[in-house]
Image (spheres, rainbow, N blue to C red):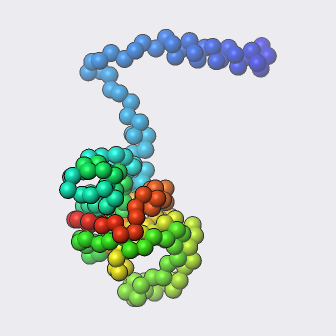
Amino acid sequence: MTGFRIKMFAAAALAAACLSIAPAQADDRYEPFNFNSLFSGFASGFGGSPLMRRQVPIDAKYAPGNIVISTSQRRLYFVTARGQAIEYGIGVGRDGFQWSGVKTVSAKREWPSWTPPAQMLKRRPDLPRYMPGGIDNPLGARAMYLGSSLYRIHGSNEPETIGQAVSSGCFRMTNEDVTDLYNRVRVGATVYVMR
């Protein structure tokens, strides 16, 4: 057989095999394919459920445009409408660095530079005193600054830390998710941080 005929034969055999598969019966033996199972472990520290962005219900007391953060669940919710939000997986502060309260998004930056605060430099004198924005910067692709505090919602070049408690109080997101959130949230939005 020529190469073309082999390819045609293989395609026909595959099509016949696909068409001959009986439809699944609705009984206890049938378990629907869970697409999300392909990604279990991705951006969750490989130890829990996937932290993929999705639309979810939320308490209707939160106004559209605001952010709700649950540090215990390691989730961030951007409220899109009364009772509706987009849920994102996040990394949170490690033990001793978690906090709660209400802040305001005071500024937004694309590919932000990073100057470690004095408290961090005392703990980690090996850190650079300044790092320009870019793919190697620990703040990632975008940052949203929370009031006059040292805390931010920011991207990360370590997506494996999403779903973990590893930061010094900031909230980490994948660069893809933080860019999505950055494009939605406005300066002045209220951020509710709960444990």
Residue 2, relative to residue 149: is it above or below?
above
In front of the other: 176 or 93:
176
Q: Is residue 183 above or below residue 140?
A: above
Q: Looking at the image, which is closer to me, 171 or 21?
A: 171
Number of marks in the rendered image = 0
The residue that appears at 29% across and 72% down in the rendered structure is 103
Q: Is residue 62 in sight in this rendering?
A: yes
Name above or below for residue 83 compared with residue 166: above
In the picture, measured across the screen, residue 153 lies left or right of residue 20, that is: left
Image quarter hosting the C terminus? bottom left
The image quadrant where one finds the N terminus is top right
| Placement of 123 over or under 2, stated as above or below | below
**Relative image position of residue 46 (x, y in whole percent):** 39, 52
Lateral position of residue 119 relative to residue 69, left or right: right
Q: How far across and down, in percent of the image, does residue 72 sit? A: 24, 61
**Image quadrant assignment for residue 32:** top left
| Side of 137 relative to 124 (left or right) | right
Asked whether the viewer can see residue 178, the reply is no
Residue 79 position within the rendered picture, expressed as x and y whole percent measured from the top left: 31, 55
The residue positioned 58% from the left and 17% from the top of the image is 14
Query: Foreground residue, 137 or 69?
Result: 69
Q: Which residue is drawn at 39% across and 40% down?
A: 36
Residue at point 51% right, 86% down? 129
Q: Where residue 16 sits in the image (x, y, percent)?
A: 56, 12
